[in-house]
Amino acid sequence: MGSVPNKQGRFGVYGGRYVPETLMPALLELEQEYVRVKTDRGFQSELAYYLKHYVGRPTSLYFAQRLTKRLGGAKIYLKREDLCHTGAHKINNAIGQGLLAQRMKKPRIIAETGAGQHGVATATVAAMFGLQCEIYMGTEDMQRQALNVFRMRLLGSTVTGVDAGSRTLKDAISEAMRDWTTNIRTTHYILGSVLGAHPYPMMIRDFQSIIGRETRRQILAAEGRLPDYLIACVGGGSNAMGLFHAFIRDKNVKMVGVEAGGLGVESGKHAARFAGGKPGVLQGTMTYLLQGDDGQVNLTHSVSAGLDYAAIGPEHSYLRDQGRAEYTSVTDDEAMAAFNLLAREEGIMPALESAHAIAHTVKVAPTMKKSQLLVVNLSGRGDKDVQQIAKMRGITL
Amino acid sequence: MTSKLDRTFAQLRQRGEKALIAYVMAGDPSLQDTEQLVVELGQAGADIIELGVPFSDPIADGPVIQQAAERALRSGTSLRTILPMVTRLRARTQIPLVLMVYYNNIHAFGPERFCHEAAQAGIDGLIIPDMPPDEASPLKGPAAAAGLQLVFLLAPTSTAERRTFVARQSQGFIYYVSLTGITGAKLLSVADVSKNVEKIRKVTHVPVAVGFGVATPEDAANVAAIADGVIVGSAIVKQIAAHRAKPEMVKHVAEFVRSLKNAMRAAQPKTR
């Protein structure tokens, strides 16, 4: 496997730049600028500074002793992205793109958000860098994640509800793209996952790849060898790409992405793109997509707003075709059970997104040898989900 | 053989007229309505019809056309029902028909089969708002083989380099997006549009049609004075939406289109 993407932004047949002409010059400019800063010492040291002192990196790689014992198989390590400032890995990318926006002299940034984690990260970065900020969010997600909506507003951002289609992440992205098309001269669009048109999937992967680079160093220090198994949840797939990227060439490290199985793949109410989708083009990129026979994009369902999206990042489609990574799904119920398990066994409440990765760990760890090493990306913390969980249990707070 | 689009622009030029390109969303409110609209808008003065294919996630469109797409999808519209309607239309009118279709609809249909069947039904060209020429190679062969013209877009943000690159590949006409924004936004400055149209003319002889933000007969007249074609979309779709429950809907919309064309004709003494 050579290095991807190519100059056209292709990961094999996936990726590309399927956008209105109005956006093309901005994407080309962004690519140029990104390629420049990638090797620019000044930019990289500034980024490293903020990641260390503002985000709190490196995040720890924590040996989950009680969970390991309980599951009785592989030795389980948690990559603690939940300990990042703002509570999820999203800020790694938001800081990188925020610095880039400053370099490009764009005074205004916009973003979409599903679970609200990327929105909060972007609002935070906007406040810290003194940029004007508007966040688009589906009205359905605004209800599910009311706390994060309030957090973004407290940080000084405008949160604009999107009342079209399924009123979730997909519609928020479309609306952000429309805003960007309209205000392109003053505005940088901080996309939150490894989605959209080139260079976004590549750039966001690179900004998130610090997760895997740290993990590699940390596991070598702790165990003297690489892990056998990596597990991460996959909505767009930025936390998974961030973890996987540093291990792509290590053929003995198995990589598994966990999609949202919702009410079960057979129910049709899910966001398992590989189980139920086929390649297509949505919001700038060619990738696996949940769609009908005539190419209309399907509605998705997941208990987790951050995984509730009809397409998957194009590099994941490529890794799957190459047989380098595997993808599976767990249901809403399995994710909820995993949330409870991690809270009770380890005193860590995972985000409902990350609970999907834990749920798959519950399935595979017991089948592995005690000498094997398994790393789970705990991409975010569950504080934002507490209200929703209470509501699901019929509890008024 | 020259294409129907090329002939239309040539004939209009001879008459000292500019093309009125009228957009309707196929299946809004129903395909029977669309069929009747195409025939009568042609009689009312539209020179080319741009036929929208509804898509669930239309990133280039504003609320008016998004809602039209939602109505069309609810009425069960897809390429599978649109193409037979085009076949029926071809027994009634020879007006050039250009499909405005997002790429995923074509991808799901199969690009080769789609080009063949669309041309067979009587489609003359394609506008694919989310497919810049950079991504068009898989479609170029099948489109050329079927005799479909690929119309590409230019925008106010387009650099000189992109202007040349896009203009060289656009067939039939160039769709100049008058503003940085989505369909249905408000037209800002005819002077800016004029400047950009002139820049495009320097690199191509293909006619330039201007769309996005042309809403009134006055807008249409102003744009007709500086471009080869005037594209009116959201303003027509709004009329359809407002009158969609009434039996005289088609008459209302045809009347509006007539007023657009009349204003364009009245503005025409200026020759290029």
Image (cartoon, helix red, strand yellow):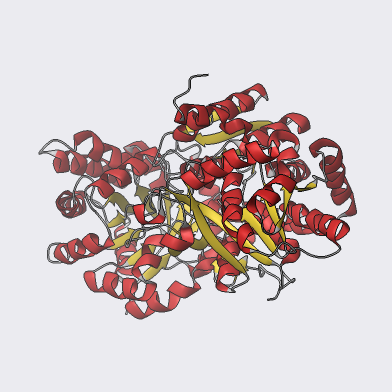
Image height of A50 relative to A273, above or below = above
Of A24 and B21, which appears nearest the observer?
A24
Residue A384 drawn at (x, y percent)? 60, 31
Residue B226 drawn at (x, y percent)? 45, 49
Can residue A55 be seen here?
A: yes
Residue B32 drawn at (x, y percent)? 14, 52
Of B175 and A40, which appears nearest the observer?
A40
Of B9 and B265, which appears nearest the observer?
B9
Can residue B181 be seen here?
A: no
Image height of A109 relative to A229, above or below = above
Residue at the image point whose x is 82% and y is 36% from the top: A54
Residue at the image point whose x is 50% and y is 73% from the top: B137
Residue at the image point whose x is 85% and y is 49% from the top: A43
Of A220 and B38, which appears nearest the observer?
A220
Q: Quadrant of the N terminus of chain A?
A: bottom right
Furthest residue to the left? B247
